[in-house]
Amino acid sequence: MGLFLRIYTNLVESKRNRKDSWLRDKKSLERHHIVPKHNGGKNEESNYTYLSRREHIIAHWLLWRIFRKNGDRWAICRMSKVRPYYAGKDHPSWGKPLSEDHKNKLMDRLDEIFTM
């Protein structure tokens, strides 16, 4: 088992017992799919762990280092932005298609971030 996979496994397994805290205050912890949905993970309790925002970003960074899936790159970028009032369907751009130019700029920025 590689180093990044060992760190990821330790992180997600050590935080599974936080569900009660997450149920009380969903602002301080986030539910993370251990096997991400973009990797075929299911919405099942056995596939959840509960992480702080920082831990959640680190978890997706570790997954990206291990598997190099674009879904983890997108997750890191989405979580790195402070959007307290604009999440999901509340965001003004929800459901609007991105222009090709916008998509290209986003991908260029992701490439810059991940080649640092």
Image (tube, grey):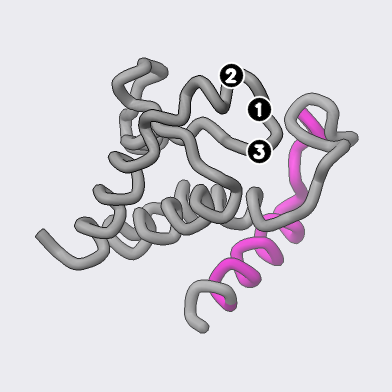
Question: In what element is the residue under mark 2?
Answer: helix
- Labels 3 & 1 near each other (Cβ < 8 A): yes
Based on the displayed image, in which of its 4 quarters is residue 81 positioned?
bottom right
Q: Which mark is residue 28?
A: 3
Asked if 35 appears above or below 45 in the picture, the reply is below
Judge whether residue 37 can be spotted in this image.
Answer: no
- Labels 1 & 2 near each other (Cβ < 8 A): yes
Asked if 75 appears above or below 61 in the picture, the reply is above
Residue 66 % position (x, y): 27, 60
Residue position for label 1? 26
Q: Residues within 10 Å of mark 3 (few under 14, many from 20)?
A: few
Residue position for label 2? 23
Residue 108 % position (x, y): 62, 71
Task: State the extent of the magenta-drawn residues as a range.
Answer: 93-112
Asked if 113 appears above or below 50 in the picture, the reply is below
Question: Which residue: 30% across, 21% down?
Answer: 46
- Labels 3 & 2 near each other (Cβ < 8 A): no
Residue 17 % position (x, y): 38, 29
Mark 2 residue type: Leu
Question: Which residue: 70% across, 34% down?
Answer: 27
Mark 3 residue type: Ser
**Cα distance, mark 1 to mark 2?**
6 Å
| 108 part of magenta stretch | yes
| 103 part of magenta stretch | yes
Please tell me which of labels 3 and 2 falls first in the chain.
2
Question: Which residue: 22% across, 57% down?
Answer: 5
Question: Which residue: 84% across, 37% down?
Answer: 86
Residue 101 % position (x, y): 75, 60
Mark 1 residue type: Lys
**Cα distance, mark 3 to mark 1?**
6 Å
30 to the left or right of 11: right
